[in-house]
Amino acid sequence: MRDTGTTAWAAFEAAEPELAGTVRERFGQYTHHALATLRKDGSPRLSGIEADFRSGELWLGMMPNSLKARDVRRDPRFSLLANPGEGTSMGGGDVRVSGRAVEVTDPGTVSWYAKEAGAPQPFHLFRVELTEVVRTTVEGEEVVFRVWAPGRPVRTIRRGNDESPPREDRG
């Protein structure tokens, strides 16, 4: 865990390989996903984006001076939802990662990434530091949330389609 209360993708993957594998698989089903950032006035902005896993990191590349890039340069907090797919079945559930987007400006790293990913330059490159990972599925009549945060094991929270409060599975 880093001083900011965040975790790099590789550390999350080592700590929770099953959930990390599910998240990677879910993001791998589609190219385009939904990125939530914060505008200058604090209101949310939702943008399309491609997410990329390379060398033990989760990367976000953005067009030069795009609104989303300006948002995370000003306030690095974000949430990234994997494309839920077509229809209403949620395609095996959905996944969301939240954290901080750390801009990478080292020319060698940017050049390496551009070559590896086939990304046209110039662009803004951000490395993801995780603060939360959530997988949501529907099991029978319940919505099930599997939630991970740095320094904690995965928690499973269930809620039904009634007024009962959510309940946490106890291992």
Image: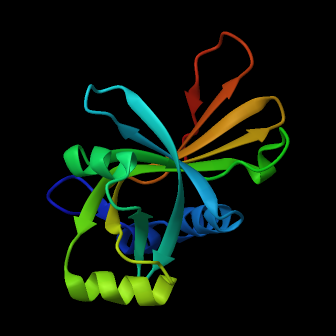
Left or right position of 5 against 71? left
Q: Is residue 166 above or below residue 15?
A: above
- Which of the colour schemes (rainbow, by chain, secondary structure, one colour) is used? rainbow
The quarter holding residue 167 reads top right
Please provide percent x and percent y for residue 65: 31, 55
Please provide percent x and percent y for residue 101: 31, 57
Q: Residue at x 41, y 61 (%)?
A: 62
Q: Residue at x 79, y 51 (%)?
A: 91
Please provide percent x and percent y for residue 86: 82, 47
Please provide percent x and percent y for residue 46: 49, 38
Q: Residue at x 71, y 48 (%)?
A: 84
Q: Residue at x 19, y 63 (%)?
A: 2
Left or right position of 39 against 55? left
Confirm whether residue 151 shows in the render.
no
Using the image as rendered, state which of residue 169 and residue 57 is in the foreground. Answer: 57
Hey, which residue is sitting farthest left in the picture? 3
Confirm whether residue 130 shows in the render.
yes
Q: Is residue 168 above or below residue 73?
A: above
Left or right position of 144 against 100? right
Hey, which residue is sitting farthest top in the picture? 163
Which quarter of the image is occupied by the N terminus?
A: bottom left
